[in-house]
Every structure is written in C-alpha cells, then in structure tokens.
Image (cartoon, rainbow, N blue to C red):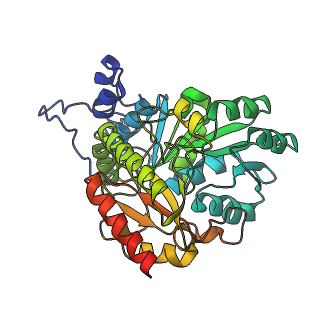
Amino acid sequence: MTTSDHGSDHVSDHVESFDSLVIHAGQHFDPITGAVVPPLHLTSTFVQDGLGGLRGGYEYSRSANPTRTALEQQLAAIEGGRHGLSFASGLAAEDVLLRTLLRPGDRIVVGNDAYGGSYRLIARVLGEWGIEHTVVDITDTAAVRVALEAGPAKALWVETPSNPLLNISDIAALAEIAHAHGVTVVVDNTFASPALQRPLALGADVVVHSTTKYLGGHSDVVGGALVLNDDELAERLRFLHNAAGAVSGPLDAWLTTRGIKTLAIRMQRHSENAQRIAEYLREHPAVASVHYPGLAEHPGHEIAARQMSGGFGGMVSFAPKGGEAAARRVAENTRLFQLAESLGGVESLLNHPASMTHASVSGTQLEVPADVLRLSVGIESVDDQLADLERALGQATVG
C-alpha cells in the first residue's frame, strides 16, 4: 500500500510551501458533512460489501485505518517522500526498518553519539540475532569511509543533530560515500524535524522519526515514522509493519496529525529561544561548555547552516562548572524547565542523559559525560526560561 492507495491528496496537489503542506497534506474535508477536520476513525474493523468487497481498501485497523492513512500522507508530504509509515513508537519504526534491511551476519555502521535507545536496539536486541555493528565518529566522513571499506555493510545510521551532544553530520557527503559502497543511508531527523531539515533531498534513503517529539509537539502521544522514496523497500516495510503489528492507533495518529499542523511555527519559536539560551549559557561564568549548532564556534556550524534552514532546533546541551555534582544541582533546582525524559513539546524540559535517557549506553563507546545536561527548550517566554536557568545555576554554584 502506498500513501495514495486510499485516494489522492487533492489539497496538497495545489500547495508547495512547507507551511501549507503541514496543514493540508492528507487532510480531506469529510465528504458527507463537510467537516474541515477529518473524522477520527475509532474502529478495529470495517464492514465489507460481500467477500473481498472492501470499502476504500479498508478491512482491519492493524492493516490500515483512514486516520492513520491521513497521517502517513502528511508525513510523506512534509519530508518530501513518496511513502510514509506510522508506528506505535520511534523504536518500533526503527525495529521494522532494521529487520527489513538486515539479516544475521549483516553489519550496520552507527555513530558514537546516537540515541541510547537506538543503540540498545542495535547492540543488545538485534545483536543477539547475529546483527553486527561498528561504532564510528559519524561527523568524520573520512572515518566513516574507513569503516565502510573495512568490510561489507548494509546500513549507515546517521543522527544529526545528534542526541544529546548536538553533533552535526554532513548528510550529503555521507550519502555519497555510503552509496558508493552499496549501503543504505538512514537519517534520524527527530531533533531537526522536516521544518528545518530534509534528509531525503540530501541523499538519504530513509528518514526515521520519533513522532513523540517535535512532530506531535505536545507531550501527549507516543509514535514513530518512516519516510522514503523507494517503492520496493516501502512494500517490504509495509509487509512487516502489518505482520509484526507495531502500528499507531487511530487516536495516536489523530493527535500526531494535529500536532504537525503547527510544526512550522513551533519550530521557529523553539529555535529562536534555543539560540538565545545557548548564547546566554556560552557567556555564563558557571558554565564550562555549550553544545548548540547555532553557535558560530560549534564545529558543525557551517554544515548545519548549509543543510538546515530556518533555525538550528530547540535542543541545547551544556556542562556546568563543577562536574557531575553541579549538573545534578542544576537539574534539581530548575522550575520552568521540568526534570523529565523526552523532548520536543511546547513546554521546557531538562534531562540528565547519563542517568536518564542514555543510561543504557553507560560503559560503551556511546557513554555520555556525567556532567552534561540536555535542555528541550519550549515555546514559553524566553525571559522566563533565562530567569529559571539563572536561578538554578546560581544555586548550583552556591551548593
């Protein structure tokens, strides 16, 4: 099934700008009532007109549901792809992708600053089934070339900006190297979102998202997505999508679609606030280092400026002076920045990766320094955000 199996996307056929696509792609008004917002189809099954007489191609909601179809059309449109698939979580999407691409004995090359959950899936889950992996500095194209030349590989896993250190990889350069070796390029675009970065246009083969984050944008739904152009690979993915059953439910799909409609304007505010906060932290006497690609001194700034547009995202990581003890004091003394896992919502969150989101990679090549804090900068008043950080940093220094 493709994104067009259940009818053409009439409105998006007539709009081209991203700001319009996020609102209109996949969003047909109800033909019976004229309702502007498509109905939420909370159903598990569909009545058939005789044996095999499917209405609109729907038979059972694990295989397809109109609300999920609308989201998948929307996802494909905003990433500039032909095929979109919506999953129950980002890791469910990654699992189906990796089990489709890889077989026992195959190797995947992954960055040394990847999300801990992704690495856990690759190393500890799929590793037990014979999948091999090589860890490399994904920002170093020469190192990636060496890793690919060292032996056959089936996939290159790219995360840019990376989680949590905001490292930047050159998607176009990596795609050129990987394709020369017959390797499929997967880009996790969760941190940037398609509002700021389009990996398929830069040569990536598959884009993966945790739609829980910026696409949903309101911390009220868990989901994942894959977007790609390859028809044959899309069919293989759809087979496992249905056969394994890790699909998004209709309410989750509906909430994600609603979130995507404000993605463009939210990412603008996230980026503006994060830029201000990164610049503030850079000058703060209690801060040892700041990781944000929007800063001119960031080692990946020039690449980010070239392959991202409209901002550098809402994620900022930093290390206060005083090491892990100071980082923990800051984490426990913010108020507007709430201490929680996840990211990408309208509200500001603070995370200590070493003991929270990336605890699973402790002791590996992906271990995150214990003094690093990760900020998911929300869309509140930046003055309130800065005041909250100033207060917490002051208390950490006193402590």
| Vertical order, 213 against 187 (above or below) | below
User: Which residue is at a point 44% across and 49% down the rendered structure image?
Assistant: 279
Is residue 202 visible to us here? yes
Q: Could you say where residue 34 lies in the image, as x and y percent from the top left?
A: 13, 31
| Vertical order, 76 against 350 (above or below) | above
- Farthest residue to the front: give it: 285
- Farthest residue to the bottom: give it: 399
Is residue 1 visible to us here? no
Task: Please name whichever residue, 144 or 1, is drawn nearer the observer in this view of the structure.
Answer: 144
Q: Could you say where residue 290 lies in the image, as x and y percent from the top left?
A: 53, 56
In this rendering, would 98 be left or right of 15? Answer: right
State which quarter of the image contains the C terminus: bottom left
- Farthest residue to the left: give it: 33
Task: Please name whichever residue, 374 or 22, is drawn nearer the observer in this view of the structure.
Answer: 374
Q: Could you say where residue 53 lies in the image, as x and y percent from the top left?
A: 36, 35
In this rendering, would 125 be left or right of 244? Answer: right
| Vertical order, 394 against 157 (above or below) | below
In this rendering, would 165 be left or right of 389? Answer: right
Task: Please name whichever residue, 80 or 345, is drawn nearer the observer in this view of the structure.
Answer: 345
User: Which residue is at a point 36% across and 54% down the rendered structure image?
Assistant: 249
Q: Could you say where residue 150 lies in the image, as x and y percent from the top left?
A: 88, 44
User: Which residue is at a point 71% across and 28% down the rendered structure image?
Assistant: 176
- Farthest residue to the top: give it: 14
Q: How many marks?
A: 0
Task: Please name whichever residue, 47 or 108, is drawn nearer the observer in this view of the structure.
Answer: 108
